[in-house]
Image: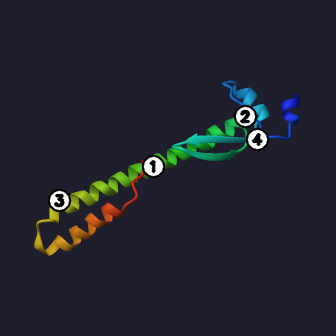
Amino acid sequence: AWLKKFEGTMLVISHDREFLDAVTDVTLHIDAAKLVRYGGNYSKFEDMRAEQMELQQNAYAKQQEKIAHLQKFISRFKAKASKAKQAQSRVKALDRMEKIA
C-alpha cells in the first residue's frame, strides 16, 4: 500500500503484471541503446509498445516493397541509354533512403 503513495522515483523489477499495474504510472523501456518513456501503467505500456511495433513492421514492409520496385526498375533500365539517367537517379534515391530495421 505504501508503494502506491510513494512520491519519488523507484526502479522496480518484477514479473508480476498486476503488481506493476498497481504501482507504476511511468515505464522506461530500453531498446537499441535508447531509453523511451511511456506514461501509464505496465499494461498501457504493453499496448502502446505492441501498437508501435505493428506500425514499425508495416513501415518496414512498405519500404521493402519500394526498394524492390526501385531495384527492379534499375536492373531493367540501367543499360538502356534513354532510361540510364532515370535509373541512376533511382540508384541515388536508394542510397539516400534511411533503412528501417
Please report the residue visible at 11 percent of the width from the left and 73 percent of the height from the top.
81
State the residue position of label 3: 75
Q: Is residue 61 left or right of residue 33?
A: left
Query: Of the residues under marks 1 and 4, which one precedes in the sequence?
Result: 4
Q: Amino acid at mark 1?
A: Asn
- How far apart are the alpha carbons under marks 3 and 2? 54 Å
Q: Amino acid at mark 3?
A: Ser
- How far apart are the alpha carbons under marks 2 and 1? 33 Å
State the residue position of label 2: 11
Query: Of the residues under marks 3 and 2, which one precedes in the sequence?
Result: 2
Asked whether 85 or 10 is in front, the reply is 10
Q: Is residue 56 left or right of residue 90?
A: right
Please report the residue visible at 15 percent of the width from the left and 65 percent of the height from the top.
78
Which tag is nearer the camera, tag 3 or tag 1?
3
Is disc 3 placed on a helix, strand or loop?
A: helix
- How far apart are the alpha carbons under marks 1 and 4? 29 Å
